[in-house]
Amino acid sequence: MDWIHRITVAALSLLVLVTGWMLVQHEMARREAAASVPDTAQLLKRHYDQIMADNARIYAQVISLQEAGEYQEALDKLKELNKDRGESAWGYVLEARLENKIGHLARAIHAYRRAVEKDPDYVDKNTPLFVGSEIMDIITVSRGKLNRERKLRPGDQAIRTAINDIYYLQRRIAGGCE
């Protein structure tokens, strides 16, 4: 072998070694970067767990009154909390549940609408906040009653608003936009 051939073989060998070393370094850096990125699913789970823990802490008195069957007192306490802390989507869900227990279906439906407008996660089946099935239960019960009321009192704005709220909630639960 002449000296040009030896230099060429040495240069190619050196090039292969350097390229291999660079590939190993790149793979190690990629694995370190992947290990340092937090798992999105874990972040979402922590986020929803925090929301539910905060809601349980903030509305503990309202929930205990509701469980005791004191619905009007729970609703009064809820309105007091909302006045002090500001309105929250979970507060509207609790309000809807209480209004339903009291028998005010139109108010319950409107409170659900306000909860969904404030936080669409309440009608997203992929979140732990989903309350779409209980909304649909109330809609099923109230649809017939509200349609009868609309026929009896065609000019009543409250009934018309409640029916519009039903249509809105049905669209949102079905996956439609606002």
Image (spheres, rainbow, N blue to C red):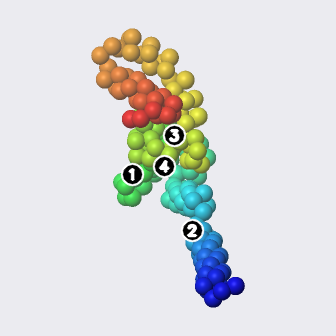
* Mark carried by residue 90: 4
Q: Amino acid at mark 4?
A: Trp
Question: At numbered mark 1, what does the secondary structure look like: helix, strand or loop?
Answer: loop
Mark 4 or mark 2, earlier in chain? 2
Residue 107 visible in rendering: no
Q: Is residue 154 left or right of residue 75?
A: left
Q: Amino acid at mark 2?
A: Val
Q: Is residue 155 above or below residue 22?
A: above
The residue where tag 1 is placed is 87
Of labels 1 and 3, the one closer to you: 3
Q: Gap in Å between the C-alphas at discs 3 and 4?
A: 12 Å
Mark 2 or mark 3, earlier in chain? 2
The residue where tag 2 is placed is 37
Residue 168 visible in rendering: yes
> How packed is label 1: few (under 14 Cα within 10 Å), some, or many (20 or more)?
some
Task: List x then y, in percent, for residue 91.
Answer: 46, 49
Q: Gap in Å between the C-alphas at discs 4 and 1?
A: 9 Å
